[in-house]
Amino acid sequence: MKYESSVGGSLGGNAAPQPMLAGVELGGTKCVCILGTGPQDVRAQVSIPTGQRDSTLDRINSVLDGWRDTHGPFEALGLASFGPIDLRPQSKTFGYITSTVKPGWEGTDVFGRLGGHRNLPAQINTDVNGAALAEGRWGAARGLDDFAYITVGTGIGGGIVIGGELIRGAHGISGELGHVMAVRDGHPCGCGAKGCLEQYASGKALTRFAQFEAATRPGDGEHLLSLVGGDPHKLTGPLVTKAAMAGDPIAVDAFSQIGYWLGRGLADLTQILDPQILVVGGGVIEAGELLLAPARAAFAEGLPSRARFPVADIVAASMGNTAGVVGAADLARRR
């Protein structure tokens, strides 16, 4: 599956008429379906809340079947789903969600339920890998063959492209930067370990840092607390971001803390992969330099040898919240 970094503009390039492709991003809170030939030629797009498994998958199938009736046949289908997903081609559970904290979804045959029964080519990968493909083809890593995409949202995920190839790993779970150890015997993580980076550099960590500091330093978080009626336990990630952009010192400090841990994690990743660029996406990146500036500082601190040889830059993703579904459709092009 060679990575075509030099081709841009549409899901199949610019040289010839492009095929109609469908993409589905199955996310933890919503599912997005897209139909078109590329980001600049979207014929239809639908967003569906991710509810109970069967009803959600039935609604997605209805959308896809309706598009075939309305817009004509499409040539391939790409699926990008929350996971982890079994991506071993010869596995009996290929395309299944192997584990998830979302009730009722563990063990779901996403590939079979959405793509396997249609008489057309289909591909599946994780939602983060789909976003990585989109950023590499059209976004912040366009034209590069060696990069890592890190999504910082409620949790932390990652997609890796090396030598022009999307790296899946032996079991389809490569790039899980959020579950490397950051702090020995630190905060418990949902994966069962303690001290995972996700507990210190994610949107969840941002909220926890802000809640603690607002409760212990209320005089410094006047603006932040005014957003929640004085109750720090009501703080959310978007509210902390809003307050930080307004200059609230506690909110800014919360970003400094998660930025520090993110930068240290990216330094470790760089020591292993030596990428050309590190692209940071996800909901928390809306804060821009409030996150990236401390991340870059910690990154430099964690790479004392960077003065002797060049290392990756840390940049913000440019595809926004469309990256996952556009990347899903790009999977169809790579069938």
Image: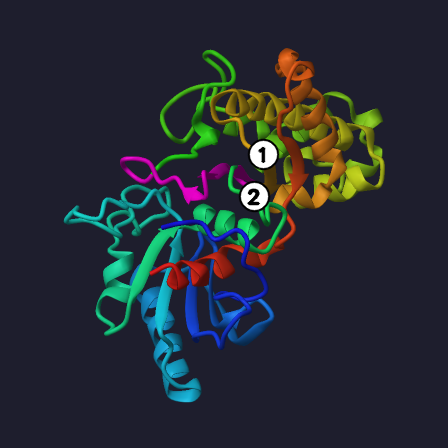
Q: Is residue 228 visible?
A: no
Q: Secondary structure at mark 2?
A: loop
Q: Going from the N terminus, do you reach mark 2 or mark 1 first?
A: 2
Q: Amino acid at mark 1?
A: Gln
Q: Nearer the viewer, residue 81 or 331?
A: 331
Residue 160: in magenta span: yes
Give the percent coordinates (x, y) of residue 246. 84, 41
Q: Residue at x 45, y 12 (%)?
A: 185
Q: Which residues lie in the magenta part?
A: 147-172
Q: Nearer the viewer, residue 307 or 293?
A: 307
Q: Secondary structure at mark 1?
A: loop
Give the percent coordinates (x, y) of residue 127. 44, 50
Give the percent coordinates (x, y) of residue 193. 38, 22
Residue 330 numbered tag: none
Classify mark 2: residues with Cα within 10 Å, few (<14), some (14-19) or many (20+): many
Residue 199, placed above or below residue 133 = above
Q: Is residue 227 left or right of residue 199?
A: right
- Find disc 2 in the rendering and name its residue: 144
Residue 263, placed above or below residue 46 = above
Q: Is residue 62 left or right of residue 289?
A: left
Q: CA distance from mark 2 to mark 1?
A: 7 Å
Q: Is residue 309 left or right of residue 93?
A: right
- Find disc 1 in the rendering and name its residue: 276
Q: Do the residues bearing badges 2 and 1 touch, measured as CB atoms within 8 Å?
A: yes
Q: Residue at x 37, y 87 (%)?
A: 69
Q: Amino acid at mark 2?
A: Leu
Q: Residue at x 27, y 72 (%)?
A: 120
Q: Is residue 91 left or right of residue 10?
A: left
Classify mark 1: residues with Cα within 10 Å, few (<14), some (14-19) or many (20+): some
Residue 278, placed above or below residue 142 = above
Q: Residue at x 44, y 47 (%)?
A: 129
